[in-house]
């Protein structure tokens, strides 16, 4: 595997970060950037000229990660030559299907399901329900095939998210990238660093990602009860206090971050709930978040027998960035230092992360988490 990295800014245009002279040999390209830059069709056209035979994936993000750096003003690109691996990239437009579940079934139906060993998903979080999407994917794809990825967003929630495969990016799309080949090793890890506090409660009324009642009282009442006096503004500061869903037979909780409070005292989250779910409120701190990313990187290396990967994809929740603030770069540098400066890494700040909770379990949508996927060809 060979990885070339470039970046684009309005001032400097295209610059090499790591020149490997790939050109026509590249077969997969990831390009992430702020919507004001990535939306222009010229940028895609320029990438297609550079890498004419590659599947090119473009998307707008809420901050980009390139090796040991964080960018808000560049399009960052990793062009990859998989030398011994078959790559299958597919795209579904939400306008062409019934709903997010249907998007998932269509995507997985078109995959070479008997061959792929891993699947990467990148989807528009504003138009696509990530929980329903994964449920649909699992209709046709075995739960034992690991799915990792992230839901894209923008810095301004009122602005559309854009995603594209082999064309200029548009809103309302989801992309799947399947990998197959005996010489490819793909490993992944998930961590969140959120700890629970308070009593165990039950979701008593919910529809998809909107919670109406917790223990038969309004969701807003639950937050006011826990946070009043602890924070200055319950609604504004609720993003720092997600809910954790207890999974049957599992030790890890699936974290659900707050999106919006509503006039009827319900709350929308960045992932679905089921009535009867056991939940607790969650909290974290800066040192825990940094340690969790180090732990995730260490777990990946452990699975690779401490041999460096050829390429790393990282999906890191924007909610973690909101907590870390001035310490955000420290987190990325810690992850990058684990893999070494010569290991190319690319990713973005996401609005939903996709990964199995534990090995050999089906993939779930997470919030407030970091997901690392590493690739190595023998």
Image (cartoon, helix red, strand yellow):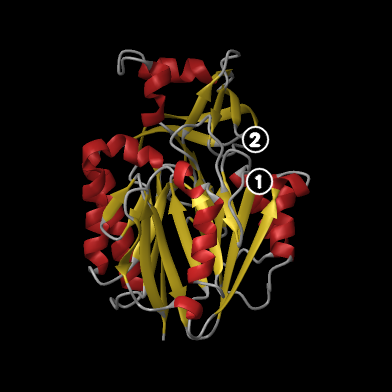
Image vertical order of residue 275 relative to residue 64, above or below: above
State left or right for residue 157 relative to residue 343. right
State left or right for residue 4 relative to residue 109. left
Front residue of 361/355: it is: 355
Task: Please report the residue visible at 66 percent of the width from the left and 59 percent of the height from the top.
Answer: 91
Q: Position of residue 66 (x, y in %)?
A: 33, 58
Q: Position of residue 351 (x, y in %)?
A: 48, 42
Residue at which label 2 appears: 208
Front residue of 228/49: it is: 49
Q: For mark 1, does the 10 Å Cα neighbourhood hold few (<14), some (14 to 19), or many (20 or more) residues?
A: many
Label 2's element? loop
Q: Is residue 315 visible?
A: no
Task: Please report the residue visible at 29 percent of the width from the left and 58 percent of the height from the top.
Answer: 295
Front residue of 93/249: it is: 93
Q: Is residue 274 visible?
A: yes
Image vertical order of residue 230 relative to residue 115, above or below: above
Image quadrant of residue 181? Answer: bottom right
Pointer 1 or 2: first along the chain: 1
Q: Position of residue 130 (x, y in %)?
A: 59, 46
Image quadrant of residue 340? Answer: bottom left
Q: For mark 2, does the 10 Å Cα neighbourhood hold few (<14), some (14 to 19), or many (20 or more) residues?
A: some
Image vertical order of residue 203 relative to residue 188, above or below: above
Residue at which label 1 appears: 132
Calculate the distance from the C-alpha at mark 1 to the C-alpha at mark 2. 9 Å
Kindly identify which numbered label has been placed on residue 329: none
Task: Please report the residue visible at 36 percent of the width from the left and 64 percent of the height from the top.
Answer: 6
Image quadrant of residue 223? Answer: top left
- Number of dots carrying numbers: 2
Q: If the image is split into quadrants, where does the C terminus sit?
A: bottom left
Q: Are marks 1 and 2 in contact (CB under 8 Å)?
A: yes
Q: If the image is split into quadrants, where does the N terminus sit?
A: bottom left
């Amino acid at each position: 595997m060979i990885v070339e990295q470039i970046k684009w800014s309005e001032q400097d245009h295209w610059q090499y970060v790591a020149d490997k002279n790939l050109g026509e040999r590249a077969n997969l390209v990831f390009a992430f950037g702020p919507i004001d830059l990535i939306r222009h069709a010229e940028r895609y056209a320029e990438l297609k000229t550079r890498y004419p035979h590659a599947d090119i994936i473009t998307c707008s993000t809420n901050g980009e990660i390139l090796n040991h750096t964080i960018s808000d003003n560049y399009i960052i690109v990793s062009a990859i030559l998989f030398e011994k691996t078959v790559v299958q990239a597919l795209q579904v437009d939400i306008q062409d299907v019934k709903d997010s579940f249907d998007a998932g079934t269509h995507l997985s139906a078109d995959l070479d399901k008997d061959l792929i060993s891993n699947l990467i998903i990148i989807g528009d979080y504003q138009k696509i329900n990530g929980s329903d999407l994964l449920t649909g994917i699992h209709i046709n794809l075995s739960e034992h095939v690991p799915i990792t990825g992230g839901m894209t967003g923008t810095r301004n929630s009122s602005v559309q998210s854009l995603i594209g495969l082999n064309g200029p990016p548009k809103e309302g799309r989801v992309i799947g990238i399947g990998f197959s080949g005996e010489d490819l090793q793909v490993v992944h890890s998930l961590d969140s660093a959120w700890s629970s506090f308070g009593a165990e409660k039950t979701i008593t009324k919910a529809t998809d990602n909107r919670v109406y009642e917790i223990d038969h009282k309004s969701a807003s009442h639950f937050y006011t009860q826990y946070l009043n006096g602890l924070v200055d503004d319950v609604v504004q500061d609720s993003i720092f206090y997600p809910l954790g869903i207890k999974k049957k037979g599992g030790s890890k909780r699936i974290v659900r971050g707050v999106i919006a409070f509503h006039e009827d005292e319900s709350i929308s989250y960045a992932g679905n709930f089921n009535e009867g779910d056991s939940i607790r409120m969650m909290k974290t701190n800066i040192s825990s978040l940094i340690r969790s990313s180090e732990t995730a990187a260490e777990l990946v290396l452990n699975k690779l027998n401490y041999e460096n990967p050829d390429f790393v994809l990282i999906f890191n929740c924007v909610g973690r960035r909101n907590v870390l603030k001035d310490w955000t770069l420290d987190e990325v540098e810690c992850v990058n230092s684990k893999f070494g400066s010569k290991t190319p890494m690319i990713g973005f700040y996401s609005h939903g992360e996709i990964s199995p909770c534990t090995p050999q379990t089906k993939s779930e949508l997470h919030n407030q988490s970091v997901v690392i996927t590493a690739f190595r060809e023998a």
